């Protein structure tokens, strides 16, 4: 439902194509049940065209999941700590919402 709402919101906005692609991919990744670090490469490819801090942080934070591999090698248990997920996703979602709010404020000031 969140993914559909995000894609509909992107379709209704009058954004440049690179900004619409960035937001669409970010929403898709945030709603996906599995995000391997290499999936975030699609977002990284768009950052030079439509830079946003939420994407930059997400690209950097994707490497936090490698803690799972280190834990597996040391303990033999393959588990992803909830704290890793919190550190990876909460800053991205907060920054993304702030960027959307700022973008909405700018578009209302133009009108």
Image (cartoon, grey):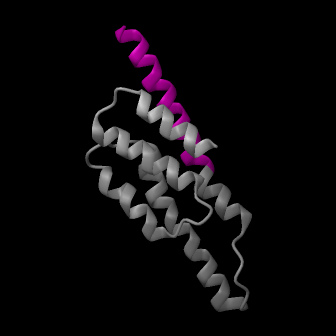
**Residue drawn where x is 33% and y is 43% of the image:** 51
Looking at the image, which is closer to me, 81 or 108? 108
For the view shown, which residue lies furthest in the left direction?
49
* Quarter of image, res 41: bottom left
The magenta stretch is 90-111
The quarter of the rendered structure image containing the N terminus is top right
Q: Position of residue 2 (x, y in %)?
A: 61, 42
- Give the total number of marks visible in the rendering: 0
50 left or right, relative to 11: left
**Residue drawn where x is 48% and y is 55% of the image:** 58
Vertical relation: 84 (above or below) 108: below
**Residue drawn where x is 48% and y is 69% of the image:** 37
Q: Position of residue 7 (x, y in %)?
A: 49, 40
Magenta segment, prevailing SS (helix, strand or loop): helix
Indicate yes or no whether the magenta region holds residue 70.
Answer: no
Q: Position of residue 20 (x, y in %)?
A: 37, 39
Vertical relation: 92 (above or below) 80: above
Q: Position of residue 42 (x, y in %)?
A: 37, 59
């Amino acid at each position: 439902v969140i993914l559909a709402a995000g894609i509909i919101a992107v379709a209704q906005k009058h954004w440049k194509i690179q900004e619409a692609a960035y937001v669409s991919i970010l929403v898709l990744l945030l709603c996906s049940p599995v995000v391997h670090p290499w999936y975030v490469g699609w977002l990284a490819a768009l950052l030079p065209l439509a830079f946003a801090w939420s994407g930059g942080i997400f690209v950097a934070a994707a490497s936090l999941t490698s803690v799972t591999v280190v834990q597996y090698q040391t303990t033999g248990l393959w588990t992803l700590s909830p704290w890793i997920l919190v550190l990876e996703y909460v800053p991205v979602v907060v920054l993304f919402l702030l960027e959307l709010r700022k973008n909405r404020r700018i578009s209302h000031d133009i009108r």
